[in-house]
Image (spheres, rainbow, N blue to C red):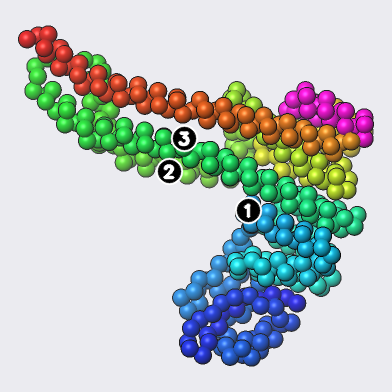
Amino acid sequence: MPAYHYIAVNSGGQEQKGIMEAESEKHARQLLRDKSLVPILVRPAQEKKGIKKVNQWTLSTKPRGLSSKELALVTRQFATLLSAGLPIEESLLAVAEQTEKARIKGLLFSVRSKVVEGHALASALREHPEAFSELFCATIAAGEKTGHLDKVLLRLADYTEQQWQVRQKLKTALIYPSMIVLVAVGIVGFLLEYVVPKMVAVYGHLNQALPLMTEILIAASNAVKNDGVYVFIILVLGIFFWRRALKSSAMLREQSHRFLLRIPLIGYAIKTSNTARFSRTLSILSASGVPILEAMNISAQLITNIPIRRAVQEAVNHVREGATIHLALKQTRYFSPMSIHMIASGEASGQLETMLDRVALTQEDEISRLIEVALALFEPAVILIMGAIVLFIVLAVLLPIFNLNELT
């Protein structure tokens, strides 16, 4: 049955909101009246448009997706129930009732209503592209065709949980360096804004030329004090308009991606992360029974860097024309020699999925090591830069005093 969002008032005059299943909107209103509730608003859960504000309650109209954590949890629960032998519609109902978030509950009820109507699960999931990626839907479709939906879902659950853990690890690792940068910027800003002007004010009464370091410090302090707010606003606006320009201009976005690939360390990280994502996705899709060309097309769409994505799409065309996968990917020049040899070995031995999985693991380990090294070098670098700035400020303040002592 379809799912409906509702807002109702109970006998005490208090508003209640939630999601319920009913045969129609009229039936939903009748069910609410049977519960001694007065319906105010009832609308389909999958409806994209709605009333933004009803009796001081805001109802979101923009379809929201699922976070990595939410998708991993829902997929794991769904896979566990299917593995236990429950039908798809009952599994979806159980997962929907398990969650406490109305947004996820409505999403799952909407998917379930399509399944009950006779649609395939993958088709029902594709109705919500904001929540379920093409990788997710294509893998589900392959699982339905092969009759191994529970195993496919378990593989997807492992994948989504791994992606969420990687993001959490990266966020956690960036907390300490971010705090160091914020503290360093705050200290330097405080010195230039409040401390330095008071210490150098006495130099205005001296009838002697100030050292170059002192003049630079005074100029920097005046710039921060007089124009700091304007510079900050300009930077914020510049970042805002730059991001808008990147979103609106495909040519500018591609040029910026090409520029990032030319930066030695950043370019290497982008290549490694995208090849790992491509290999992992292709491994999952191929192991789930998706045809190799379709799997490569879907995997290519998940590559974030435009030049790499286009090169891989050209490789897909070469494979369609009869080329082997490893030779087609080698021509892109974005895959490492080790990855190419491992893929070639997988093609020759008939274990392509296993070798692609190993390629992904190798590239992901390389990214992890790269991040660890970068963070390990970043922290002392910030401390050294901070120490150099403080030393410069101290010397700039004390040099005029030393010169005055020499004159006396």
For marks 1 and 2 on the same chain, the one whose residue lies earlier in the sequence: 1
Q: Is residue 178 magenta?
A: no
- The residue to which callout 1 is attached is 69
Q: Which of the 4 image quarters holds residue 148?
A: bottom right
Q: Give the residue drawn at x 63%, y 45%.
A: 165
Q: Position of residue 245 (x, y in %)?
A: 54, 42
For marks 1 and 3 on the same chain, the one whose residue lies earlier in the sequence: 1
For marks 2 and 3 on the same chain, the one whose residue lies earlier in the sequence: 3
Mark 2 or mark 3: which is in front?
3
Task: Locate residue 278 relative to residue 49 in the image: left or right.
Answer: right
Q: CA distance from mark 2 to mark 3?
A: 25 Å
The stretch in magenta equals 328-350
User: Which secondary structure, mark 1?
Assistant: helix
Tag 2 near tag 3, CB within 8 Å? no
Q: Nearer the viewer, residue 33 or 223?
A: 33
Q: Is residue 206 visible?
A: yes
Q: Give the residue drawn at x 74%, y 25%.
A: 336
Graded by Cα atoms within 10 Å as few (under 14), some (14 to 19) or many (20 or more), the crowding at tag 1 reads some
Q: Position of residue 89 (x, y in %)?
A: 79, 69
Task: Locate residue 81 relative to residue 39 in the image: left or right.
Answer: right
Q: Nearer the viewer, residue 215 or 275?
A: 275
Q: Which of the 4 image quarters holds residue 226?
A: top left
Specify the amino acid type for callout 1: Lys
Q: Nearer the viewer, residue 11 or 331?
A: 11
Q: Give the residue drawn at x 60%, y 23%.
A: 264
Tag 1 near tag 3, CB within 8 Å? no
Figure label count: 3
On-image quarter of the N terminus: bottom right
- The residue to which callout 3 is attached is 177
- The residue to which callout 2 is attached is 237
In the displayed orientation, state which residue is furthest to the left. 408
